[in-house]
Image: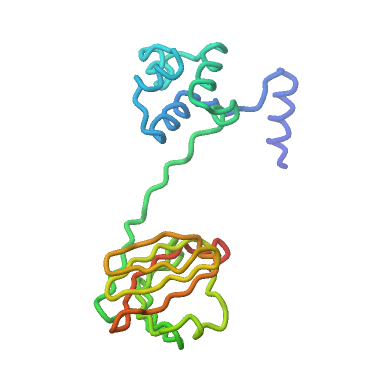
């Protein structure tokens, strides 16, 4: 700490002034909660019993809500006090990224049961992993163990028919155009049942521990 900083701190103590504390910005937080739930001012008014004009003034920091108004907001919106008083989230802007993969130009990753084509491989730190798969397996017996990985997965059949095996459910037949969303840490496996090998599109969420 520098001498100047020490002097400033001493002056604050001597004068009784407190260090700067960021205001609660409760109005901004209320608006964030309202918009996140796709509520209009009228919706919030009906839920809380507060007038629309009052809610508008609170959101625009024209008035500070009374303790009674805060209680009505908490009760009517189904939230607790810390949620209402927590700072609004910082607004982040996207970087406008994009990554085009031309047909057949993904990264090939063949296995004994699947022939994967990884898509959009040029983008780092993606939140999703998209890939197209030719399902070569014709029997569940071809799998030595369940396929499982962290996160969630969306799957759509692009061509052919498959049986989706999962450890907690009976096998499910999916045909062209069918889709399913499931927790991918649940054991699963795909088997083609159509004359030609089926083709599916999958999108997996990326593990938080992935680089």
Nearer the observer, 183 or 28: 183
Image color mode: rainbow
Nearer the observer, 196 or 120: 196
Q: In the image, residue 108 lies at what x, y percent?
A: 38, 84
User: Which quarter of the figure has residue 110?
Assistant: bottom left
Q: Outermost residue, left direction?
A: 103
Q: In percent of the image, x 32 and y 76: which residue is there?
A: 199
Q: In the image, residue 44 lies at what x, y percent?
A: 40, 21
Nearer the observer, 23 or 111: 111
Q: Outermost residue, bottom direction?
A: 112
Q: In percent of the image, x 49 and y 64: which residue is there?
A: 206
Q: In the image, residue 27 lies at what x, y percent?
A: 46, 23
Q: Where does the N terminus fall, quadrant-wise?
A: top right
Q: In the image, residue 82 lies at what x, y percent?
A: 60, 29
Tell whether 111 sits left or right of 103: right
Tell whether 14 sits left or right of 124: right
Q: Vertical placement of 53 versus 159: above or below?
A: above
Q: Vertical placement of 136 versus 49: above or below?
A: below
Q: In percent of the image, x 46 and y 60: which residue is there?
A: 182
Q: Vertical placement of 157 versus 37: above or below?
A: below
Q: In percent of the image, x 49 and y 21: which residue is there?
A: 76
User: Which quarter of the figure has residue 156?
Assistant: bottom left
């Amino acid at each position: 700490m520098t001498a100047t900083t020490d002097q400033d701190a001493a002056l604050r103590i001597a004068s009784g002034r407190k260090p700067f504390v960021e205001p609660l910005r409760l109005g901004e937080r209320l608006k964030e909660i309202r918009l996140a739930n796709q509520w209009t001012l009228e919706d919030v008014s009906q839920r809380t019993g507060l007038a629309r004009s009052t809610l508008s003034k609170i959101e625009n920091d024209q008035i500070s809500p009374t303790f009674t108004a805060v209680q009505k907001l908490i009760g009517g919106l189904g939230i607790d006090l810390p949620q209402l008083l927590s700072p609004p989230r910082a607004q982040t802007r996207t970087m406008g990224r994009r990554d085009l993969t031309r047909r057949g130009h993904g990264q090939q990753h063949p296995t004994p049961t699947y022939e994967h084509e990884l898509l959009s491989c040029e983008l780092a730190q993606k939140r999703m992993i998209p890939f197209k798969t030719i399902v070569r397996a014709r029997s569940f017996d071809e799998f030595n163990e369940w396929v499982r990985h962290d996160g969630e997965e969306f799957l759509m059949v692009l061509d052919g028919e498959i049986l989706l095996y999962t450890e907690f459910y009976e096998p499910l037949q999916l045909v062209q155009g069918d889709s399913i969303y499931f927790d991918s840490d649940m054991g699963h496996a795909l088997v083609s049942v159509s004359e030609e090998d089926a083709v599916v599109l999958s999108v997996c969420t990326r593990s938080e521990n992935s680089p």
